[in-house]
Image (cartoon, rainbow, N blue to C red):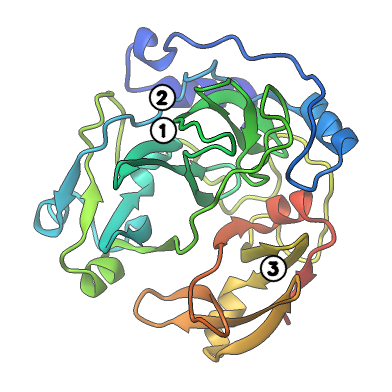
Amino acid sequence: MHLSRRRLLLASGATLAAACAPGVDLPPARGAPSSSGAAADELEEISQLIQSGGPPPDGIPPVEKPIYLTIAEASKQWKDDAVVDTFTIDGQARAYPRFITVWHEIVNESVGGKPISITYCPLTGSTLIFSGLLANGDTTTFGTSGQLYNSNLVMYDRATKSMWPQLLGVAVRGDLKGQRLTELGGAVTTTFGRWKAKFPNGVVLSKDTGHARAYGTWPYGDYDTARGVMFPVRHTDDRFHQKKVVVGVRINGAALAIPKSEFIAGRRDTSVEVGGRALVVRHDAELDAVRVLDRITGEPVGAYDVMWFAWYAFSPKTEVLR
């Protein structure tokens, strides 16, 4: 699938005006001190390697005012095998069907009066949840820039128009260059049937997004299983199929990839250390998912499903759990 096809597929099911919503003028790259630990020259190189993914800014429109359904209501719309990204915050379990988020990539939400953004990149298979509280104390929501780095979604914040590759979580362009977003851990990818059985009082993102899209269809065809990626990446490794799903963990500059299917087949807790932090990797049998927890506190740490090619492109020094 090449760039022009991606643009056409994501615009389908809506008027041209809705698909190509008024964008923003994204700022050019410029120097700024880094508070994330990333070297300034590395951030500059990343900024220069960002490329167009096809749609204009917000041409893939985020969901701005999400509406949620009860389990009973959602069960009328989704089969049990529908893939959902899930998390629990403030005691409420929520599920985001990928048949919806594939058309939007970002859901801007407010929890407890504080902004958060649920972000999904279909080209890298990664869902991360970020706080909208910036390092300077300001709050923001995020939009899709229409740009990619390592074939991964590049967001922009609406407060400063700085640009943030999703799998990096660091601004590489704009006033906030070098600053890191706060990632909210605990997100799990599973199926709707498994999730609703475990969380019968949960809520599910509604198709009522304010946009006309072909929800329930997949605009990327066999991309998730086919070899090859749509856009260039900086680092490659052929130990696994490019689209193989691994669970990625990064702590204190260190990275670990957990081959998901192999770990689930083993079904045993495994103690690991990443960036000097003691962790335990666990199979959640109810959700058929892999969770990573702090070995002392039992709290979930930031870990998420991601395609191998993308994980390696961002973390070429990653270790692999065997």
Label 2 environment density (alpha carbons within 10 Å; few <14, some 14–19, many ≥20): many
Residue 301 seen in the figure: yes
- Residue pointed to by mark 3: 257
Secondary structure of the residue carrying numbered label 2: loop
Q: Quadrant of residue 240?
A: bottom right
Please provide percent x and percent y for residue 264. Answer: 53, 81
| Mark 1: amino acid | His
Give me the residue at 34% from left, 64% from top. 191
- 269 vs 248: above or below: below
| Mark 3: amino acid | Ala
Label 3 environment density (alpha carbons within 10 Å; few <14, some 14–19, many ≥20): many
> Label for residue 104?
1
| Mark 2: amino acid | Pro
Give me the residue at 59% from left, 39% from top. 135
Q: Quadrant of residue 68?
A: top left
- Which of marks 3 and 1 precedes in the sequence? 1
- Which of marks 2 and 3 precedes in the sequence? 2
Please provide percent x and percent y for residue 13. Answer: 32, 22
Q: What is the distance, in whole Å, between disc 1 and disc 2 at their CAs?
A: 5 Å
Secondary structure of the residue carrying numbered label 1: loop
> Label for residue 158?
none
- Which of marks 2 and 1 precedes in the sequence? 2
| Residue farthest toward the front in the current orientation of the protein | 137
- Residue pointed to by mark 2: 61
Residue 217 seen in the figure: no
Left or right: residue 217 versus residue 244 is left
Left or right: residue 4 versus residue 110 is right
